[in-house]
Amino acid sequence: MRNLPTLIIAGVLAAGPAAAQSPAAAPSKPLSTSLGVVVFPAKGQTPSKQAADEGECFAWSKGQTGVDPMAPAAPAEAAAQPAAPAQAPPKGTRLRGAARGAAAGAVIGEIASDDAGKGAAIGATAGVMKGGADARRQQAEAEKTAAAQAQQQQAQQQAAKADQLALFNKGFAACLEARGYTVK
């Protein structure tokens, strides 16, 4: 057991400084790959020449289109179009339901048992219940409408962003093709 630590230390020393160093960093991917574009050096351009050309074409396309696909979305865009607040149902729905129910209950109570007060009380209770159900239904409809509007707005923003990226990539590809690359 005493020899095990000695063997481990001896193994590390024998491997030399190369084993103690971390592996070499992987080369970063080309700019074109980050944009979702495949570029082939059709005229035998070197990788360093291709990287330089891609950088120049990126800057050119950015200047021509006004689009920077590497820039994060600005918080001002999200704040510029706030989500529409859900509209609350009109106040007094239960009170109106109670009044209608009491009126109907009074008429029915008078006809059925010559007691309009008892009929009004029953009708008012039923009216409050119906008014509350109506208020909940209206609130649910308002929330559903707001959610649909928010989803539609998000889809429109995503489509606009995709259009901008396509425009940028068109300019990027045109620049590279003029320099002798095949772009797909």
Image (cartoon, rainbow, N blue to C red):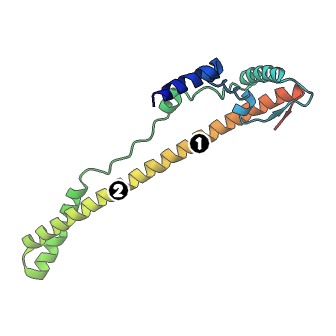
Badge 1, how many Cα within 10 Å: few under 14, some, many 20+? Answer: few
Q: Which residue is mark 1?
A: 156
Image coordinates of residue 83 in percent, x first then y, are: 45, 39
Q: Is residue 94 above or below residue 49?
A: below
Badge 2, how many Cα within 10 Å: few under 14, some, many 20+? Answer: some
Q: Which of marks 1 and 2 precedes in the sequence?
A: 2
- The foreground one among 179 and 73 is 179
Left or right of 159 on screen, residue 51: right
Q: Is residue 138 above or below residue 6?
A: below
Report the quarter where the C terminus lies. top right
Q: Is residue 168 above or below residue 126?
A: above
Which element carries disc 1, helix, strand or loop? helix
- Identify residue type, mark 2: Gln
- The foreground one among 74 and 88 is 74
Which label number is shown at residue 138? Answer: 2
| Count of numbered badges drawn on the protein | 2
Left or right of 7 on screen, residue 91: left
| Extreme residue in the right direction | 43
Report the quarter where the N terminus lies. top left
Residue 119, quarter of the rendered image:
bottom left
Residue 95, quarter of the rendered image:
bottom left
Left or right of 100 on screen, residue 58: right
Residue at (87% x, 29% y) in the render: 41
- Identify residue type, mark 1: Gln
Residue at (64% x, 27% y) in the render: 70
Image coordinates of residue 156 in percent, x first then y, are: 59, 42
In front of the other: label 2 or label 1?
1
Residue at (33% x, 48% y) in the render: 88
Residue 27, quarter of the rendered image:
top right
